[in-house]
Image (cartoon, rainbow, N blue to C red):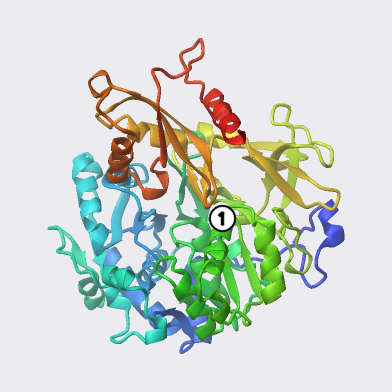
Amino acid sequence: MTETAVRPHHAHWPRRLPRELVVPETSLWFNLEVAATRFPDKAAYIYCGKVLTFAELKRQAERLAGWLQSVGVERGDRVALFMQNCPQFVIAFYAAMRANAVVVPVNPMNRADEFAHYITDPDTSVAVCAADLAGIVMSANAEVPKGQRLKQVLVTRYADALPATIPEDLAPSAAMLQWLLADPPLPEGCTRWAEALGADLAPGPHLAQADDLAMLPYTSGTTAMPKGCMHTHRTLMHNAVGSQWGWGSAESVGLAVVPMFHITGMLYGVLSPVAGGATMVLMPRWDRELAGRFISRYRVTHWTCIPTMIIDLFGSPNYKRFDLSSLIYLSGGGAAMPQAVAERLQQEFGLTFAEGYGLTETAAPSHANPPERAKLQCLGMPIFGVDSRVVDPLTLEEMPVGEVGEIVTHGPMVFTGYWKHPEATAQAFFELEGKRFFRTGDLGRMDEEGYFFITDRLKRMINASGYKVWPSEVELLLFKCPLVQEACIIAAKDAYRGETVKAVVVLRAEARGSATEQDIIDWSREHMAAYKVPQKVQFVESLPKSGSGKVMWRLLQDEEAKAAAG
């Protein structure tokens, strides 16, 4: 192990932690083998009261891996996971790892128009989805060219993982329970989960190595359509075994509420708990009352979330009845934690919210606040083995302490490149002092103690409660709307979400005078994920354009900012 060069934050590095990690030279599947051997009867996941042990998780993953291989999944083939948080998500993930395949996690809020991209771009072989999403998968599959279609669609019901009787204090709301228990008719051509596991097929040899591709999470970056971030077993393994940052251990009990398709939910809900043998209490969707009761009942010690969840929990009329005394580590990102909320956490519960920072390209955290020395509204310091700098976005020369520039990162968890996008990959990296640094596209500064603070985004991105919305993708979808001639997407301030999506729209001639802002919103809800749907719509006669004909989105963004400032 080579020690990294001394950087300013090392003077404040927690003495309990090593500067770098010794990372296993194995596949992610091996983490489950180890956990199931060490802790066979220990709860890996608890789902509304039902326990899935590590041994049973391994057994079901192996059987599903055998089925995947029986339908033609070979080493390196892509398997899409399209569902909300549930035990089946974790089982399917490790089944793909056991089958030497590559996981493509897909946001379950996507519609058919969007899902087709996750079939054709990664050349996906099999999709594993929830029953309520099977229609979307099959509709998307029917629209892609025959030679690129899925080989199989495997469908599971959320109810299959629920206990026969849910204890009263663990029961979700009536609306959530109705959704969990739903059993919609399956489209023709699907295979049921129980059928695949019931075949009891043994997989072939496990062949995946540390540098093999393991996962293709998608992020839009600066292109119109989402791009796959190539993560190997090695890049994912680094953060998976780094739980000691927040005092993680096999005794830890976590609350898995961040969606598992998202890189943060994937790390803290799927990868890290299995690597460390921790127990996770699974939440299918966010529900503040359920979260409070789960933390109280299971004595949750670790909770990674986004600040809006804490704000919502404090909004519950029952929050003072919740017993949060078991929590020892509360962390998250996606948006800055408001100072008033952080102070309430400290005063009422003695808890420090340790903010962190990372991207899909960095397998979640590249920076984090040490819990014993956290700074508010701060990204934290570079974590194990990470070297981050602030550079001039044009010259790429390092900026002085306190000066704003682009945050760039070198570290063992950085992805290897964008799938099928060599030019975008080349543009995303540069060399500094002999190291390959990734350009995050985020503008920030570093203080004299080596802590990083974000100030703006170089890339054109909207951050709505931690969900990244890429305007160019939403614009492309809006162009399909029969009412829209042109559209430009910008960020608008939102008291709850931080930022929300605003569409500046030029209507088609035949729609002018009859179409309403609500018509645009309603159409969007049918054709895109809910977090991408414009919450505000403004009709204009034309969009401002440059001499080359490009829409001057920054001008519209600046006008929106001025209007918000009053």
Residue 60 falls left or right of residue 565? left
Classed neighbour count for the residue bearing mark 1: other residues with Cα under 10 Å, few (<14), some (14–19), many (≥20): many
Q: Quadrant of the C terminus?
A: top right
Q: Quadrant of residue 129?
A: bottom left
**In the rendered view, would you say 132 is above or below 457?**
below
Q: How far across and down, in percent of the image, does residue 478 sit?
A: 34, 33
Q: How far across and down, in percent of the image, does residue 401 sit?
A: 84, 42
**In the rendered view, would you say 175 is above or below 416?**
below
Q: Quadrant of residue 53?
A: bottom left
Q: Residue furthest toward the left?
A: 188
Identify the residue under disc 1.
363
Q: Quadrant of the N terminus?
A: bottom right
* Residue closer to the observer: 94 or 335: 335
Q: How far across and down, in percent of the image, does residue 373 sit?
A: 79, 65
Residue in the image at 46% along x and 35% along y: 471
The amino acid type found where label 1 is placed reads Ala
Residue in the image at 30% along x and 61% along y: 128
Residue in the image at 82% along x and 41% along y: 402
Q: How far across and down, in percent of the image, does residue 252 sit?
A: 59, 80
**In the rendered view, would you say 418 is above or below 337?**
above
